[in-house]
Image (cartoon, grey):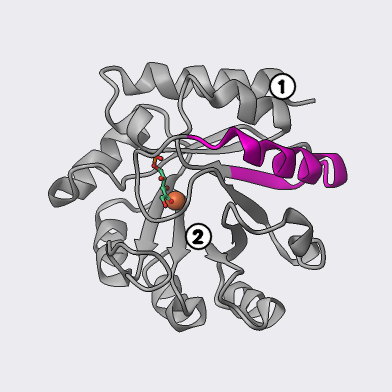
């Protein structure tokens, strides 16, 4: 089956004291999935939330597809708790991981899909040996750690290389993506679009989500 356009808002810059309502609003406005940014203060210089909060959110939102973007030094540690919390896609950075194949297998055995993420400084070809075990590859378009940063267009050759070599792979971009930068991502071949500030802060979230999905669809073969 060909890849589908999917928009996954990041709730990083949402009102976290009101997370369930903010998340439900995004879903009601057409979000295809929720992108939950988990940061441990070690892999990145910022701290967000962990599995207890994801589990609480799952108790309120029963059916939506949850991705956790694990910006953590030891992703292996959080596999079981996140599976128990109801996560569907466990996306972890390959940079701090010694044995990506083993961690990926554990993620899959726990019942979650496998996402492999790379920071801007990591070569995409480093992922070549792992693509066959991944459901999703995430190309970061900002340095991970904070929402609201500027999109790095120079990451697009990585996306294009992945699309050229893996036509049916789910390719995700994350960081500074919004209506102004979506064309660039879609043209390169991304089909899973994470967007935080541009969606959460929009006066018409439904319109922004639809606009981005339409742009991605127009580039997909
Ligand atoms: O992983 C992230 C930061 O490390 C976030 O998902 C990303 O920054 C989304 O927010 P924005 O669209 O505002 O950049
Ligand atoms: Fe993210």
Judged from the image, the secondary structure of the residue bearing numbered disc 1 is: helix
Q: Residue furthest left?
A: 17
The answer to whether residue 155 is magenta is: yes
Q: Who comes first in sequence, dot 1 or dot 2?
A: 2
Q: Mark 1 points at which residue?
A: 219
Q: Closer to the camera, 128 or 24?
A: 128
Q: In which quarter of the image is ligand 1?
A: top left
**Which image quarter: residue 22?**
top left
Q: Name the disc covering residue 111, or none.
A: none
Q: Is residue 153 above or below residue 77?
A: above
Q: Look at 35% across and 50% down and name the residue there.
A: 146
Q: Which segment is the magenta one?
A: 151-172
Q: Can residue 168 be seen in this view?
A: no
Q: Can residue 221 be seen in this view?
A: yes
* Mark 1 or mark 2, whichever is nearer to me: 1
Q: Distance between the residues labelled 1 and 2?
A: 27 Å
Q: Is residue 28 above or below residue 102?
A: above
Lateral position of residue 83 relative to residue 42, left or right: right
Q: Is residue 22 above or below residue 83?
A: above
Q: Measured from the top left, where is residue 36 in percent x and y?
A: 38, 54
Q: Measured from the top left, where is residue 3 in percent x and y?
A: 72, 38
**Which image quarter: residue 209?**
top left
Q: Name the residue under label 2.
A: 88
Q: In this view, does 135 lie above or below 180?
A: below
Lateral position of residue 76 relative to residue 118, left or right: left
């Amino acid at each position: 089956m060909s890849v589908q356009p999917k928009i996954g808002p990041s709730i990083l810059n949402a009102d976290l004291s009101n997370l369930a309502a903010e998340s439900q609003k995004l879903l009601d406005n057409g979000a295809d999935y929720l992108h939950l940014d988990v940061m441990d203060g070690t892999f990145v210089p910022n701290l967000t939330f962990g599995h207890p909060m994801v589990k609480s959110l799952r108790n309120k939102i029963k059916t939506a597809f949850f991705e956790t973007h694990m910006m953590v030094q030891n992703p292996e540690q959080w596999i079981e708790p996140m599976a128990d919390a109801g996560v569907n896609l466990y996306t972890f950075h390959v940079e701090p991981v010694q044995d990506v194949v083993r961690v990926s297998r554990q993620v899959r055995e726990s019942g979650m899909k496998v996402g492999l993420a790379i920071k801007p400084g990591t070569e995409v070809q480093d992922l070549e040996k792992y693509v066959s075990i991944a459901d999703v590859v995430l190309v970061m378009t900002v340095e991970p750690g904070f929402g609201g940063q500027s999109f790095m267009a120079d990451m697009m050759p990585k996306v294009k290389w992945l699309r050229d070599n893996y036509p049916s792979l789910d390719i995700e971009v994350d960081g500074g993506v919004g209506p102004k930068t979506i064309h660039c991502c879609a043209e390169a071949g991304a089909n899973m679009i994470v967007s935080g500030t541009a969606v959460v802060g929009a006066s018409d979230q439904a319109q922004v989500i639809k606009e981005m999905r339409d742009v991605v669809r127009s580039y997909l073969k």
